[in-house]
Image (cartoon, grey):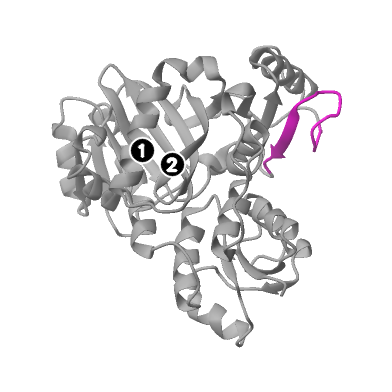
Amino acid sequence: MTPRVIVLGGAEGQLACIAACRRLDAEIVLVDPRADVPGIPLSDQVIALDVMQTAAIVDALAGTRIDAVLTDQSDYAARAAAALASALALPGQDPDVVESCSNKLVMRQRLTGSVPDLVPWFRHERDQAAARAFVIAQSAPVVVKPLQSQGSRGVSIISSAADIALLDAAFAESSGKGVLIEQAVSGTEYSVDGFVRGGVLTPLAISAKTHYAANPCLDERCDFLPSMFAEVEQPLLDAMHRIVAALCIDTGIVHAELIAGAHGVTLVEIALRGGGGGISGLIVPFLTGFEPAEALLRHWLRLPPLPEPRDYHQRAASLRFLPFTPPAQLTKPSPEVPGWLSLVRSDQVFAPGSAPRSSAERAGAIIIGGQTEDDARLAEAEAMRLLGYAVGA
């Protein structure tokens, strides 16, 4: 019998899910209210509803057999997938575990008891005036963030009373749930992507992050170069294994951000989904030959698992966010550049020197892969040249 799979969301981040369905000869029921997303022409049926409208989606199915619910790279859709799978009596993530991996306050509360050394001190404030008073009284920098946001929306470091307006931005993104105020930890930020089976984490990729000079809470690039994480790899992985166990993550794709420094390792956040921006859909498969979305779908459909991934140290990749709107009008990677895996351009125009406040305000991104770190660096430089940027941009 042909499997029938609901894919929640039809934007770029879900194309790997759609491709996984096709590799397994599954029919695709896409749920997305937008008429212009690229997943629509790739699907067999479309339900034009928001992915969170669980009851309405069930009604729209009108008793149609569904075998699995699949999504990736979105916290919002991950919560929706857990709810819909439960409503359809299908295998899926425990909504309580998804909540602990998407609500930053719940995440910290649950980790404080079992892995307190991996969590910064934190405080939850719903009252804006009280939050302002608390932040101003601090003698050291703090981070303020909404409880549930993705792409660094509303996340800022406040170093002095002169930065207090940044707190208002956090509250504006908080949907009335208040904000988290926590210790600003020094060190280098890294991401760790992996797949969990039966509570056991298999790491798939590690990157060292570089932030914008004018926005230290937003990635300017993520370098999946072994030389940049070798010294901290084992502490990062040790922390990840402890976090997965503490949050009772049994099976799924995980993406985490951690800071490593003289203090050790501190968790920024962990998500029960793959890294966005092409990390889960392009970079992890390039590095390891392992397709996270297909691995998860096979689990939900009770099919044999994928072969073990290749060693992610054997290749190199970089995700580089563009500094401003590219001068050249390229719309796809040039075949002249081996290893140029992806080019995404924003519909908006961003001028040189502009400082993005969140991932929604970036000018676009490129993903480069190479057999060696030197290959990746040279290919990135050539891609940037073809896009019209000056050397060193």
Residue that numbered label 1 is attached to: 241
Q: Which residue occupies 54% across, 68% down? A: 51
Residue sticking out furthest to the bottom: 62
Query: Vertically, is 103 above or below 217?
Result: below
Q: Looking at the rendering, which quadrant does residue 284 occupy?
A: top right
Give the total number of marks visible in the rendering.
Answer: 2
The crowding category of the residue bearing disc 1, from other C-alpha atoms within 10 Å (few below 14, some 14 to 19, many at least 20), is some
Three-letter amino acid code at the position of disc 1: His
Question: Mark 2, residues whose alpha carbon is within 10 Å: few (<14), some, or many (≥20)?
Answer: many
- Under mark 2, the amino acid is Leu
State which region is magenta.
329-346
Q: Is residue 187 magenta?
A: no
Looking at the image, is 102 positioned above or below residue 204? below
Tag 2–tag 1 contact (CB < 8 Å)? yes
Give the structural element (helix, strand or loop) at label 1.
Answer: helix
Residue shown at 41%/50% (left/top)?
149
Q: As drawn, is 237 to the left or to the right of 177?
A: right
* Most common SS among magenta residues: loop
Residue 66 or 52: which is nearer the viewer? 66
- The secondary element bearing badge 2 is classed as strand
Query: Pointer 2: what residue?
Result: 201
Judge by depth and name the residue closer to the eye, 224 or 201: 201
Q: Earlier in the sequence, mark 2 or mark 1?
A: 2
The percent position of residue 237, horizontal first and vertical second, equals 39, 30
